Amino acid sequence: MFDGIARRVVSIWFHRLASDRFLRQYPLSGPFALTIKHSNANRLYCLNTEAAQQGLHQGMSHSDARAFCPKLQTAPADLYRDQQFLLTLRRWATRYCPWVGLEGRDGLVLDISGSSHLFGGEDNMLSDIRTGLTRAGLSAQIGLADTRGAAWALAHFGEGQAAPGAMLPALKDLPVAALRLDVKTTTALIRLGLRKIGDLATTPRAPLTRRFGPNVVMRLDQALGQQVEEITPLAAPPHYGVRMTLPEPIGLIDDVMAGTKRLLTRLCATLKTHEMGARVFVVTLRRVDQGHQEVELRLARPLRDPLRILPLFEKGLSEIDAGFGIDQLRLEATQTEALPAQQMTHVATDSDDRLDDLITRLGTRIGLENIQRFLPADSHIPERSFITSPAAYSTAASGWVCRNPRPLCLFHPEPIAGGGSYPPTHFRWRRMSLTTGRATGPERITPEWWFDDDNWRSGLRDYWRVETTQGRRLWLFYTPQNPGWYVQGEFA
Amino acid sequence: MTTSTLPYFPLKRGRVHEVCGPGSFGFLAALMAQTCGPTLWIRESHRPEYINPMGLGEFADPSQMLVANVTHQTDGLASAEEALRERAVALVAIDISKPLSLTAGRRLQLAAKTGNSTGLCLIPEGMGSNAAESRWRCRPLFHAQDSTHFHWSLIKNKSGTVGSWHVRWNRTSRRVDMVSPVSE
């Protein structure tokens, strides 16, 4: 890797990551395990020390575990939050070196070449890592070696250090499973009598490759440093947040707006360099009495133009209670979307921008999802032939095809009295006495059997346009399979 | 059948008007067809009636319509004011269920004037506000051959006389034609 500097790699294995994360949040004593649903049975996924001491093990079914240990407390596992927690730990580990990568679902790998002297040597650095993790309530096993493979093996099977350049003495007593081989290969190797890495290293290589493929020899070479293995550090995601601390508390709306404007200018510049636009902004105002006030702004489309965004904050900021004054402002774009730079043209109009701004403004009052637009849908069922979707998250669609006349106004079917398959001559609807003047129909619509719709339980419907002599033009339907007449709409 | 243009329609811009009667939705659809541009329809979410875009397609482009679902009339009025002032939409229609106070009606008028947009309140019979520029009562008419006939009467007008007309929706030219009264 580097000429003249020996490469040193630390591997950290959090062997109880999931349960440690849970117990940090909800501390409890006694045996505890997280369960996961696997092939239709609840199985133990991650146990704490007490549970392991009771003889329970990972992969055991939940009911068996309860039979062995009635005091066992369990909670369902949350793999996503475990992953997020591991990413947090990765960020924490960058204090030791910039090259930190993930190792599977529950490990970290750190390339500490040339950075251990900053902590006073490797031993001090390892004890520093261990202290930090213990204080955080995490159990971890740490391995240190020249290669990633050897460090992994030490973390999982030996927990120790390998002296620089002396990988084989440290590894030779570890089982072959420490080479990151799959279970099938490991079992086959053990059957051949190759139990330890030391045995494997002294075996002729050609028969091994012929018998098991190139993987075994490659893993051995990687562990012993004869083949290079890289560590891919994760790039930290960009953080869209700015803050400002004030020497004197402020309370007037104009001052808060001015402060927000400064923050917004800075944040929008950051968004611009990443070609991103914000969908949701959160302003957090810290008061001198340590209280927090949050104002959220949800936009109808991604934006990064401070002059357009600022007026939209006005309503939210005017409603906060400043108390004895505000001494810190923090602005964060919590939800962002790609917003590439676009060519400006003289034909482009600003009417779309205006409409989006209006949707945002109304959205701050009545909720962004309550402003909807119509989109065509492919269905013959009248109430499903269109969908309403939030205007902020959809674009206007053309392509409205209507073969048969449809009423302008729809409502839930209202039963009327009537018999026979022809529309009744006289009927009462909404306390009005109506007379059929002209009836056009029927148009038969069958329910969509692939949807389970309660309203269509009565079977197929024959729709009629009924023009009453009183003027009202109604949309009636008759259900022949379950006789009855209903009014469902009104024409203009 | 004589055809001539209907007075006072399309409605005066920059003002708020009112419509009542069973043909209100038809009136709104006809007005939407003649005011080019996006329309916002503010409705209270508990109301059962819903405008069907498939039926609206006969009058105007359904993709031009935005629906705002509000829980109270207070929210609806505030949203209507905002939308009228903003110049983003050409027409704002609002369902009214409780009578408007004089202040609320006047605020709507001022907002419409600022944004030079048209407002239309769909009111229940007899719940008009004094501030409205004009008030229409619409009902569909039965006609032996044609099913697009309406009876529109202008029952309040701040800038002219009132009147009553028989009209029909002309599907090809997408406009309202005045017709001679139906012989019953």
Image (cartoon, rainbow, N blue to C red):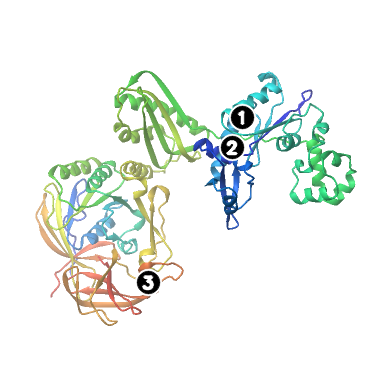
Q: Position of residue A129 (x, y in %)?
A: 63, 27
Q: Position of residue A18 (x, y in %)?
A: 58, 41
Please tell me whether mark 1 sits on a helix, a strand or a loop. Answer: helix
Please tell me whether mark 2 sits on a helix, a strand or a loop. Answer: helix
Tell which circle, 3 or 1, labels the residue nearer the N-terminal end: 1
Q: Is residue B137 left or right of residue A236?
A: left
Between residue A232 and residue A210, name the one nearer to us: A210
Give the spatial CA distance, label 3 vs label 1.
Answer: 60 Å
Q: Is residue B132 left or right of residue A488?
A: left
| A394 over A298 or under it: above or below | below
Give the spatial CA distance, label 2 vs label 1.
Answer: 10 Å
Q: Which residue is mark 1?
A: A93
Of all residues, the one furthest to the left in this rendering is B161
Q: Which residue is mark 2?
A: A86
Tell which circle, 3 or 2, labels the residue nearer the N-terminal end: 2
Residue at 16% x, 70% y: name it: A432
Q: Is residue B149 left or right of residue A89?
A: left
Residue at 66% x, 30% y: name it: A99
Q: Is residue B98 left or right of residue A491?
A: left
Residue B9 visible here: yes
| A359 over B20 or under it: above or below | above
Q: Determine crowd level at label 2: few under 14, some 14-19, many 20+ residues with C-alpha closer than 10 A.
A: many
Q: Residue under mark 1: which chain is it in?
A: A
Disc 1 marks a residue whose amino acid type is: Ala
Q: Which residue is mark 3?
A: A457
Disc 2 marks a residue whose amino acid type is: Leu
Tell which circle, 2 or 1, labels the residue nearer the N-terminal end: 2
Same chain letter for marks 3 and 1:
yes
